[in-house]
Amino acid sequence: MADASTDGEEPPAADADAEDDPGYWASLTVAEKGVVAFIALFGALLVVGLVTGGLGPAYFLYIVGLAGMYALLSFGLNAQWGFTGLINFSVAAFFGIGAYGAALMSGSTSPLAGGFNPIYGLVVALVAAAVLAVIIGIPTLRLRADYLAIASLGLAEVVRLVVLNQREWTNGSAGVRGIPSFFEGWPVLSTFPQVMPGLEIVVIPGSPIRLGTSFWSALLNVALVLVFVGVSYFVLKRAHRSPWGRVLRTIRSDEDLARALGKNTYSFKMQSFVLGSLIMALAGVFYAHLNLFVSPGDLDPITTFYVWVAVILGGSGSNRGAVFGGVLVVTIREGTRFLNEIQVPVGISPVRFAELPIDPAPMRLLLIGVIIILVMRFRPQGVLPPQRELIWPSSVDDSTPKTPKSGVRESKAGDTDE
């Protein structure tokens, strides 16, 4: 009998694996490709605004910092609602606890302490957020989710009114000023913006890009929020795939089933609620050192609304979706501020331009509402659902069988011939 190998040489194993590997871009879903394209477009618009002089370098980095802050807030809500199904309407409250905890410990106009290293403010803010989360969780997490929603909604308003009216604690409506940068007192980073030279880059003649002290300070803030976002993403990603995360998903789907399997659902819900609250407070700490001023207006309930929109649009339970939702919210919030400067042609000969007949900046809520309707209509699971995040890559790469080059009968026939 002729040897089966004489019919044709099999390609080397490495070449076969290379043919099976579709590449990174081809392996993405349509939604993932759309998200990558959106983020690339968002970054390109920022770069164009920076190069043309329409966007200052420091403000450019400020927008990036805001996007990271909203990503942190979305992470916190995602750990509560996306993982466990806990309805928390007090995102602004825990955000405010973080911001005021940092401000009252380090701000020069703080009526309580002030003048401490920002690290102490970070610790105080996180401890206060954890204690408040436990206090609100003890009476509500044993009950239905409705009670947590009502309690958290009341908590947000109570925290805002306390911050507004207790002047001897929080300086009232005047807010807290004189907040140092987060790296104040650090060996090298505290003087980094001052010692860096001022640069002027000319890409387009007549529109120079000036990099001064404010730019280097904003660059440190971006580095800080990237560290916060990176650590939070890594922790939540590992937790979501762990047995602990599987229990949380079971609780969200059917709490009675999780309880029947012997799980202490109250304990797991408390852990999830505290974890999310800590991440929200972390975003508040960053905001205090980014803005260098906090006031009761920063605890506006609209912040909670924006974060819920970010999580729903990105996909409940998806960490990647939380990042995408945060970037999208900042794009809408900050992008609509510049729509007032758009001019439209109103004449042909000669060509004349005029501003838009309506003021588009206040329409950001309408735009967000339209986006929510479209997502709920065409993609109710969110833009980036969490299914692909729940699989360990090693389990797919090592145990997924390859598609055979030939059928079972042909393989057996070849073995017999040999």
Image (cartoon, grey):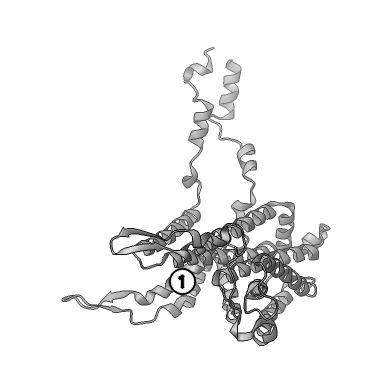
Image position, residue 279 (x, y; %): 66, 65
Please tell me which residue lies in front, 327 or 4. Answer: 327
Q: Residues within 10 Å of mark 1 (few under 14, many from 20)?
A: some
**Residue ranking furthest to the front:** 195
Image position, residue 65 (x, y; %): 52, 64
Q: Quadrant of residue 167?
A: bottom right
Q: Quadrant of the C terminus?
A: top right
- Look at mark 1 in the image and give the residue it sits on: 334
**Residue ranking furthest to the top:** 1
Q: Quadrant of residue 46?
A: bottom left
- Left or right, residue 339 beside residue 229: left
Q: Is residue 271 above or below residue 418?
A: below
Circle count: 1
- In this view of the protein, can residue 388 be seen by the observer? yes
Q: Is residue 38 above or below residue 128?
A: above
Please tell me which residue lies in front, 263 or 282. Answer: 282
- Left or right, residue 67 beside residue 243: left
Looking at the picture, which amino acid does disc 1 mark?
Glu
Please tell me which residue lies in front, 299 or 386. Answer: 299
**Residue ranking furthest to the left:** 349
Please tell me which residue lies in front, 44 or 29. Answer: 44
